[in-house]
Structure formats: structure tokens, C-alpha cells
Image (tube, helix red, strand yellow):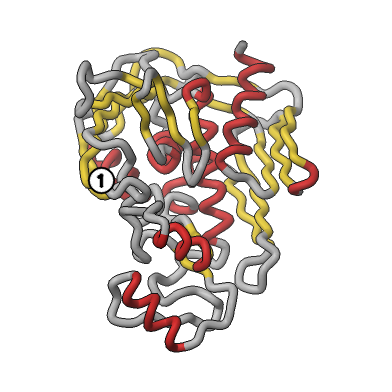
Amino acid sequence: MTERQKTIKQATSVSGTGLHTGQFGSITFNPAPENHGIKFRRIDVTGQPVIDAVVDNVISTDRGTTLGVNGTQIFTIEHVLAALTGLGIDNVLIDMDMDEMPIMDGSSRFFIEALEKAGIQVQDAEKKILVIEEKVTFEIPDKKIKVTIEPAEKLSFSVEIDYETKVLGKQFAALSDISNFKNEIAPCRTFVFLHELEYLLNNNLVKGGDISNAIVFVNKVIEQEELDRLAKLFNKPSVEVKTKGILNNIDLHFENEPARHKLLDLIGDLTLLGINLRGHVKAQRPGHFTNTQFAKLIHQKYLS
């Protein structure tokens, strides 16, 4: 059966703070015509430049995926793109009045909710689908990183992470059908180790961050004096470490939530191919650099 392209029925907005920039603003998803693709429009910049969500426009993968064209940049796009792919939306124009996507709770859940509230509109044109016919592999052996896609009847994913620590070791996550993204993957939040978060905060690198939009893993014994200092740093009455080595900021939605979030990021970054994939993606220790390099490899093999 022929699959048709989709957009949304009406505009819908999400407001919040950017994780790294600390800017508060809004993004508005607008319906778009057939074959439009996913595009961002910076309505706060002179001339309202439009940036296509394509892998050629990736200019950085440091702490998130960043797009840039002619000096205009858009930070941390992966959670929004994952939501669009998870709902099968092909065409949308996203207006922004800030440099960065709102982090919300560190997942795709709020974007899914906004898009579903707007309603999904089926269009007449056929979906653009890339059917994988030969295995494609990107790997960095010395870092134990490997991502592959191989032929399959539908799009599916399996991801393995391993941080080689007691609090976060080897985890596995899978998504057998993209239609299950909303329930199985979208609520899964980003995560960070406490020593990384301290460094970022102390160096003013997560201006919009607090401990409500990330799972914080603690990989060391912390004395009460240090906990009191952290509470002050995070502007909380108190903080403590749970038995599983997680700060008491939030409870896990799934035991393997970190691996599921890495799968979420992978889906978001592969959305930058600008086409619907048909194949099975298997990733070991994925990250934004790996994901986007892998997308470029697929593009070079199949779409150039």
C-alpha cells in the first residue's frame, strides 16, 4: 500500500528554555505543503532566514546537534526531529524566536503532545522512502563505536550503550516499529554524570539547565558537605543520591531509559537525511557525531 506524506492540520507552539543558551522563547510548528520537508525559520533574525533540516547543514555535534547556514545557527534540534519522525510527519515549517530548541524535560514528549494536539494531515503525495539494499557501516574501532543499517521490511532500531561504570554500565534498547515511538521512546530523557554537569555549570555552559531536565548519575561517593554545596548550586533545598546512583531529581520511566534516550537521539539525527528509511539500524555507543557521520555515509552511498 502506498504511504502518503503528512503534515499537521494547524499551527501549534511549545515554549521553554534552551539548555545551553539559557534563552526563553517559543517554537511554532506550521503546516507545510507536499515535498516541503522539515525546515526551521528564525523569525527573530533579520530577513527571517530558513534552514533546511538536512545533514549537510550540520556544523557542530558538541553537546547536541547544531545546524547553521550563513552565520545563523540552531542548537539542540534532535529531540524535535525525533518527535516528527516518530509521528511520521514529513512536511513542517518550524518558526523560532530563539537560538535553541526548548529542552523541556529532556525528552521528545512535549513536542509529541503539541503535534498530536494540532492534528496530523495526510497529503496526496507519496512519501519519499529510501529502501536500504546493502549494509552500510560507520565505526570508530578504538572507541568501540559502530553503527550499521541493513535491509529490512520496515524501519527498526537496536542500541547498546556501555559507560563502564557501576551506576551506568551496559544497557540495550530496541524499537521494532517506528509507530511505537510515542510510548516506548519519546518520554525518555537525556542524562549526564554529575561530574560533567558540575563542570558545565561551573563554566556557564548549560545556562538553562537544572536537575529537572536530565537524569543525573553519580559515579562517586559524596559527603554531606558536598551534597549541601550541590543543593546550593542547583538552587534546591536539598539533594541526595538514590541507591541506584541517581540524584533524587527524578524517577526513571524505564530501567534502560538512558539507552532508550540514545535511540531517540539516533532517530532525530537520522531525520536529517530528509527521507524515510527502510532498514534495521544497529548502534553501539552512538552519539551525535557518530549519528551524523553515519547519516552522511548513507547519503553519499544512496542519495548523492
Location of mark 1 (residue): 23
| Quadrant of the frame with the C terminus | top right
Residue 242 in the image, given as x and y percentages of width and height: 49, 81
**Amino acid type at image mark 1:** Gln
Asked which quadrant contains residue 161, the reply is: bottom right
Q: Is residue 275 visible?
A: no
* Closer-to-camera residue (85/13): 13
Q: Position of residue 43 (x, y in %)?
A: 21, 26
Q: Position of residue 22 (x, y in %)?
A: 29, 49
Specify whether residue 98 is in view: yes
Q: Give the left or right position of residue 30, taking residue 194 as reference.
A: left
Left or right: residue 201 compared with residue 164:
left
Q: Secondary structure at mark 1?
A: loop
Q: Is residue 2 above or below residue 226?
A: above
| Residue pictured at 47% horizontal, 43% vertical | 64
Image x and y of residue 56, in percent: 52, 20
**Few, some or many residues within 10 Å of mark 1 (<14, 14–19, 20+):** some
Residue under the image location 39 percent in, 37 percent down = 75
161 versus 278 height, above or below: below
Instruction: Single out the residue that lies furthest toward the right.
Output: 141
Residue 46 drawn above or below residue 139: above
State the residue at coordinates (54%, 54%): 260
Residue ranking furthest to the front:
203
Judging depth in this view, the residue of 5 and 17 nearest the camera is 17
In percent of the image, x 76 and y 48: which residue is there? 144
**As displayed, is residue 118 above or below residue 124?**
below
Query: With 23 as the anchor, is 82 left or right in this view?
Result: right
